Amino acid sequence: MEFSLGMPAAGEPTTDKLFDVIVIGSGPAGLTAALYAARAHLDVLVLTGSDIGGQVALTSEVENYPGFPEGVQGPELVQRMQEQAERFGARVELDTITAVDFQQHPFVLTGYNGNYLARAVIVATGASPRKLQVPGEAELTGRGVSYCATCDGWFFQDKEVVVVGGGDSAMEESLFLTKFARQVTVVHRRDQLRASKILQKRAFANPKIDFIWDTVVTEILGEEKVEAVRLKNVKTGEERVMPIDGVFIFIGHIPNTGIFQGQLEIDERGYLVVDRRMHTNVPGVFAAGEVADPIFRQVVTSAGMGAAAAMEAEKWLAEQKAEQEEREQERAVTA
Ligand code: NAP
């Protein structure tokens, strides 16, 4: 692959504007990458994807992002990040990338609104909620099955809901749901939570939250809306049907790497493989945030990865430019 830093070569879609850096995704990783790239005087475009603001935009309160001792609402935090990136010249556009071509340079990204050309790309496509994959889940999504308490909690005023999962998300969202629901029952497949101690403590202390241990949901029942869940104790094998108004599922996430299959190296769990400096296996393509982070998955670590990716992209572009200028000088001398 030969890298060029001029306008697109003949045969490429010349109507499409060429950007120094295109960031795919608009969560904390993408917006921080855009901020750093824009402040390095690069021409930056952020393509938001359909989940504008990423997962944190669906979160209620963020208490562990530094600089906000009183906590901050997730949507407000990403809105501020976007404003900060735009203040330094980053352009944020609503489009979802459906295909990428990293075999040619400038790289070509295809979205619903057309093609985009980029000298460097920062992938920050994040992760999506993992599904339970039980009968009734897909059919009743939006009709009592939800993956977002902030979005849907309000519909469950004085109702009874089940939360599936034992991690930080499940605890945080259970606590949030107690603002609306009469009773929140956490169904967890083990007898110990994975969540951090502080969230465990708060959940255990909340009189509206109770726990069913060693149990999985095997089916979600209902005609027009959720009416019950079928539960199975994984130790005894005992099954029962529990009447319920809603089911909130927080059992982790799956990285959004579908469009990069065959283009970028992906590990066995589906995460993009990056080195310590956020480089993917394709020179000029970087990745940041949950799409490339199976370990930390925090707003602050995603933002940090975004900053690092942008700094590396800037360095890489400068190196490419210097090399190109050197080649041109050599050509001029030999001509
Ligand atoms: P997570 O930590 O991976 O926890 C997923 C939970 O779902 C685990 O308890 C797991 O059970 C359970 N689970 C997974 N697959 C399941 C299945 N098929 N059926 C039933 N249960 C299943 O995911 P998360 O809670 O979304 O958190 C993701 C990351 O974000 C973590 O690093 C977390 O610390 C971070 N986070 C932080 C905060 C905060 O700091 N305030 C808030 C939200 C998220 P096992 O325990 O048995 O594996």
Image (tube, rainbow, N blue to C red):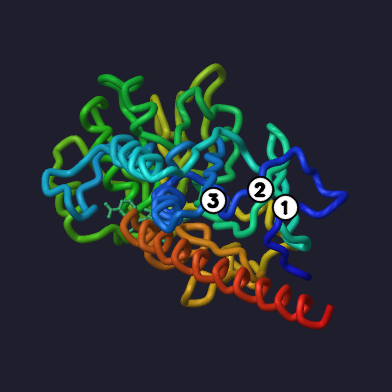
From the viewer's perspective, is the residue at label 2 or at label 3 nearer?
Answer: 2
Location of residue 204 with respect to 311 vertically, above or below: above
Q: In this view, does 266 lie to the left or right of 246?
A: right
Q: In which quarter of the image is residue 76?
A: top left
Within 10 Å of disc 3 (Cα), the crowding (few <14, some 14-19, many 20+) is many
From the viewer's perspective, is the residue at label 2 or at label 1 nearer?
Answer: 1
Quarter containing ligand 1? bottom left
Residue 185 visible at all: no
| Residue sitting at x 82%, y 82% | 334
- Helix, strand, or loop for circle 2? strand
In the rendered image, which residue does mark 2 sit on? 18
The image's mark for residue 23 is: 3
Q: What residue type is labelled 1?
A: Met
N-terminal label among 1 and 3: 1
Q: Which amino acid does label 3 sit on?
A: Val
Within 10 Å of disc 2 (Cα), the crowding (few <14, some 14-19, many 20+) is many
| Residue sitting at x 54%, y 38% | 219
> Measured from the top left, where is residue 115 in percent x and y?
72, 41
Q: How far apart are marks 2 and 3 (CA)?
A: 13 Å
Q: What residue type is labelled 2?
A: Leu
| Residue sitting at x 78%, y 43% | 14
Location of residue 311 with respect to 228 vertically, above or below: below
Q: Is residue 194 left or right of residue 283?
A: left
N-terminal label among 2 and 3: 2
Q: Of residues 63 and 112, which is closer to you in this image? A: 112
Q: Of residues 329 and 34, which is closer to you in this image? A: 329
In the rendered image, which residue does mark 1 sit on? 7
Query: Is the C-beta separation of discs 2 and 1 under 8 Å?
Result: yes
Q: How many marks?
A: 3
